[in-house]
Image: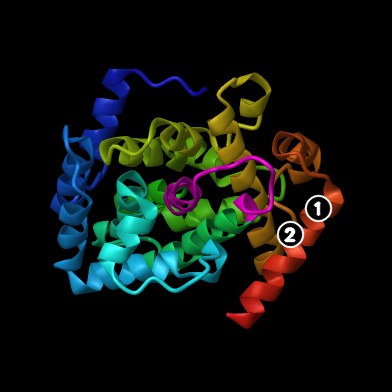
């Protein structure tokens, strides 16, 4: 695992725009952590904001979630998903609204691509033997590159050059180039955002280590390893769809991801084809 001491994290937090958790999310988390959590309180909280309620419903009614019937209101969503699941999805929805200001990139495009990965992760999770909470898959996919938004705001004059340099290199990742340019990277900054928003620990650790190629070889937390392996599959499928090429180091590490998820090459190819079909139909 990447080691981050408190002094370094404090310095980063002061030098980057790290959005505070929205009040609505803080209230939702307080309801979940109370001695006698009330589902109706959370439903009422979400239902007060029509735009937010619609965004939550749109997320869980996505074809990737595979709901047997359409969920039509916030109360129904909370009753079906439960407190923790609803709050985790709420954090993912609110993230898209949190970054505003001068930036080297389009936030709209960043969240569109992150949403694609998040939805693919949910679908992949439904195709493997291990059970991973859908909300954790979705939130990991949406948050995993959120550090890019903060990097793009802080380094708005040069960050696009860093991205272009990384995109022209078929061997090394954006995170490596960020370290060379700025002595930090989007996985580290993204971890800081996720930790500030009090996301589950396993999601925070996956965000921090999603460019750490050796993580699966020494990490013994099964939930983290499953999330990371699903993320790597989704990232590679998105790379294939967008650029018709594999993600960095995919060929060298794909077997490790397959073994973690209990699938083989043909299973992966089936999932890839199914996702292409779903995207064409939606």
**Dot 2 and dot 1 residues touching (CB under 8 Å):** yes
- Residue 84: percent from left, percent from top: 33, 44
Q: How many marks?
A: 2
- Name the residue beneath numbered marker 2: 271
- Name the residue beneath numbered marker 1: 267
Label 2 sits on a secondary structure element that is helix
* Residue at 25% across, 57% down: 98
- Residue 163: percent from left, percent from top: 52, 54
Relative to 54, 117 lies left or right: right
* Residue at 55% across, 65% down: 66
Q: Quadrant of residue 12?
A: top left
Label 1 sits on a secondary structure element that is helix
- Residue 183: percent from left, percent from top: 43, 32
In the image, residue 194 sits, relative to residue 11, either above or below, namely: below
Relative to 186, 222 lies left or right: right
Relative to 216, 161 lies left or right: left
Q: Is residue 4 visible?
A: yes
> Could you tell me how far apart the alpha carbons at marks 2 and 1 are, in whole angstroms?
6 Å
Magenta stretch in the rendered image: 124-143
Q: In the displayed orientation, state which residue is furthest to the bottom.
A: 281
Main structural element of the magenta stretch: helix, strand or loop? helix
Q: Is residue 155 visible?
A: no
In the image, residue 78 sits, relative to residue 194, either above or below, namely: below
In the image, residue 111 sits, relative to residue 129, either above or below, namely: below
Q: Label 1: few (<14), some or many (≥20) within 10 Å? A: some
Q: Quadrant of residue 251?
A: top right
Q: Would you say residue 132 sits in the magenta stretch?
A: yes
Q: Which residue is more in the foreground, 252 or 42?
A: 42
Q: Which residue is more in the foreground, 209 or 25?
A: 25
């Amino acid at each position: 695992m990447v080691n981050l001491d408190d002094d370094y994290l404090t310095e980063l937090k002061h030098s980057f725009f790290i959005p505070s958790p929205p009040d609505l999310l803080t209230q939702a988390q307080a309801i979940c952590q109370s001695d006698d959590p009330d589902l109706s309180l959370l439903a009422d909280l979400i239902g007060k904001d029509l735009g937010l309620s619609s965004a939550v419903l749109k997320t869980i009614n996505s074809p990737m979630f595979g709901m047997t019937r359409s969920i039509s209101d916030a109360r129904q969503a909370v009753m079906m998903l439960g407190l923790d699941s609803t709050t985790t999805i709420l954090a993912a929805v609110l993230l898209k609204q949190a970054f505003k200001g001068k930036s080297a990139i389009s936030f709209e495009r960043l969240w569109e691509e992150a949403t694609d990965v998040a939805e693919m992760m949910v679908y992949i999770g439904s195709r493997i033997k291990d059970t991973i909470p859908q909300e954790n898959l979705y939130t990991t996919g949406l948050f995993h590159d959120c550090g890019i938004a903060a990097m793009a705001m802080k380094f708005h004059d040069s960050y696009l050059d860093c991205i272009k340099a990384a995109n022209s290199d078929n061997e090394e990742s954006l995170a490596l180039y960020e370290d060379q340019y700025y002595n930090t990277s989007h996985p580290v900054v993204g971890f800081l955002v996720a930790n500030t928003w009090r996301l589950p620990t396993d999601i925070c650790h996956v965000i921090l280590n999603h460019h750490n190629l050796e993580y699966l070889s020494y990490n013994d937390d099964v939930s983290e390893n499953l999330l990371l392996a699903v993320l790597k599959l989704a990232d590679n499928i998105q790379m294939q769809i967008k650029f018709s090429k594999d993600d960095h180091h995919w060929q060298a590490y794909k077997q490790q991801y397959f073994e973690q998820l209990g699938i083989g090459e043909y299973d992966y190819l089936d999932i890839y084809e199914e996702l292409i079909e779903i995207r064409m139909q939606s």
